[in-house]
Amino acid sequence: MLIRLDIENIAVIEKVSIDFHEGFNVLTGETGAGKSIIIDSINAVLGLRTSRELVRTGASHALVIAEFAPVSTAVSRYLDSIDIDIGPDNLILQRRIGADGKSSCRINGKPVTAGTMKELGELLVNIHGQHDSQKLLDAEKHYLYIDEMLPDVAVLSAYQSAYAALVKTIKALKALQRDESEKQRLIEQLSYEIDEIEKAEIYEGEKQKLLDEKAMLSALASVSAALQQVKLSIAGDDESGGAAALVGAAIAATEENDLKQLAALKAALLNAQDALAEAEDEARARLEELQVNPHRLEEIEERLSVYYEFSNRYGKTEAEILSYLERAKEQLQGIKTADAQREALEKDFESQKEETYRLALSLSEQRRKTAEAFAKRVENELAFLNMQSAQFKVDFKDGPISKTGIDRVEFLICVNAGESLRPLASVASGGELSRIMLAFRAVLGEKEAVPTLIFDEIDTGVSGRAAGKVGLKLKEVSKNAQVICVTHLAQIAAMAAAHYLIHKQVADGRTYTNVRPLDFEGRQYEIARIMGGMNINELMLENAKQMLKEFENDNI
């Protein structure tokens, strides 16, 4: 249950702390004192959507902290699922709202999303108010109330599982449905791609090896070309002579004139001839060492072109190309075996549809039995709440099978004798809706999984004897769950086990809202104020005292 609520800088609240009690708690105060702000703060700390407009003017941020103890098994399981260990400590939820609109949530100090906070909050607190009553008007949600009362939830769980399996099979069947021409086109495309990749004999690491070899051969080719040019320049070719021939001709010229003056020149030319011969021999020997395959570079380029082409279609790397190949094989196999798969799925679909429909009928039967008992109990509760002539019925119509079953459930009611049953949305007034909702909660109370129920002005449109009945019913509901109620009615406030006054004051030009628990005397004065306004006299105080005494030891 909610044992403490701390609020800072929310609207006109600067700082407030409220220690709640188990059982029946009420909050009262003058109109505009800030009762709705308390509910807004609780909504915020439970993960509901907030606005920076909530932040008190001039404050950088607002803060709401809610402390709960003890926690239910459902809450403990949820905390385990999000890896939060509560240990021996109480559960603490914290919501910070910045003036810039940014918000942060924490559960026991661990940062979480607002969505996570909301999911946990739904296990901790159930808030009912004037707007919440409108949920009763949505016929699409009426089946949920009946499901809460089912004596055997295993039937509901079994149906939900069967329906989920049926939906999965239907999706698988739809995925297999393909136009025959499209199917053949895809088979041909996949077959071509598989054949092309397999023939290429791709293996991981080959592309890099080819690039390395290409770089090496490119360097060798450059050296080989230089050596070939050396040979050609020295020895010449068929069309022209080289340097060796020219030097030879020069030597011959010196020999034609055997003069001593040319001896030195001849000697130099002979040395040059020997040097050229040595250079030619060296070039030839180097070429033989290189043993360059003149076609290898072309082979490498052709192989690399395969990778370049494949990279645009199948993948940038060998691993990606091979992965594409495996996927293509699997897809092709899937298409070729689709007929067999379809037959198996169609067989599954028929059996699943039959089983799901059988469970839907079983669920519907249990819902109808539950609805009959539920309607009688709601009528009894409404009679107690001063709606003695009210008749209530749960109407069932068959509908197509869906995730909720085959039932179309709607609540019908007549609130005055002699009238016919009509849809709840077209009949009930605001005050009647409040009492109908309270009747529902009273009936569902024994199955109420949420430990704290908050009723925000559930007494709207209720007065006199009916107000007293509402108070008694709230007190009864508080036996199974903690009840926190914002009320304007003295009859309801007098029945509470704990009473808190929300009051507003102005200081230094600023408005402040405070909340304080009331002792007996304080409650007496507040109840007298609710009954008679600000002109409180001794008779009002005595009446308030008698009301409090009447319910002080009441075990209803």
Image (cartoon, rainbow, N blue to C red):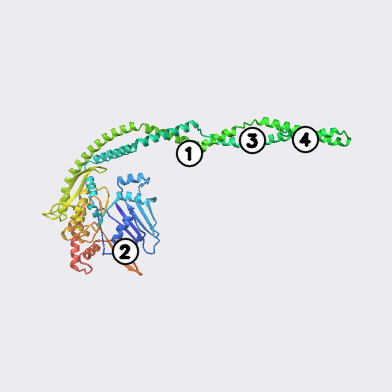
Q: In the rendering, at what x and y percent does residue 340 appear?
A: 33, 31
Is residue 1 in view from this perspective? yes
What type is the residue that disc 4 sits on?
Leu
What type is the residue that disc 3 sits on?
Ala
Outermost front residue: 239
**Which of the two discs, 2 and 3, labels the residue nearer the N terminus?**
3
**Which of the two discs, 1 and 2, labels the residue nearer the N terminus?**
1
Cα distance, mark 1 to mark 3? 32 Å
Cα distance, mark 2 to mark 4? 117 Å
Residue at mark 1: 315
Residue 246's tag is 4
Cα distance, mark 4 to mark 1? 60 Å
Which label sits in the foreground, 1 or 3?
Answer: 3
Q: Is residue 313 above or below residue 517?
A: above
Q: Residues within 10 Å of mark 4 (few under 14, many from 20)?
A: some
Residue at mark 3: 221
Asked where in the image residue 386 lies, by quadrant, the reply is: bottom left
Cα distance, mark 1 to mark 2? 67 Å
Which label sits in the foreground, 2 or 4?
Answer: 4
What type is the residue that disc 1 sits on?
Gly
Residue 513's tag is 2
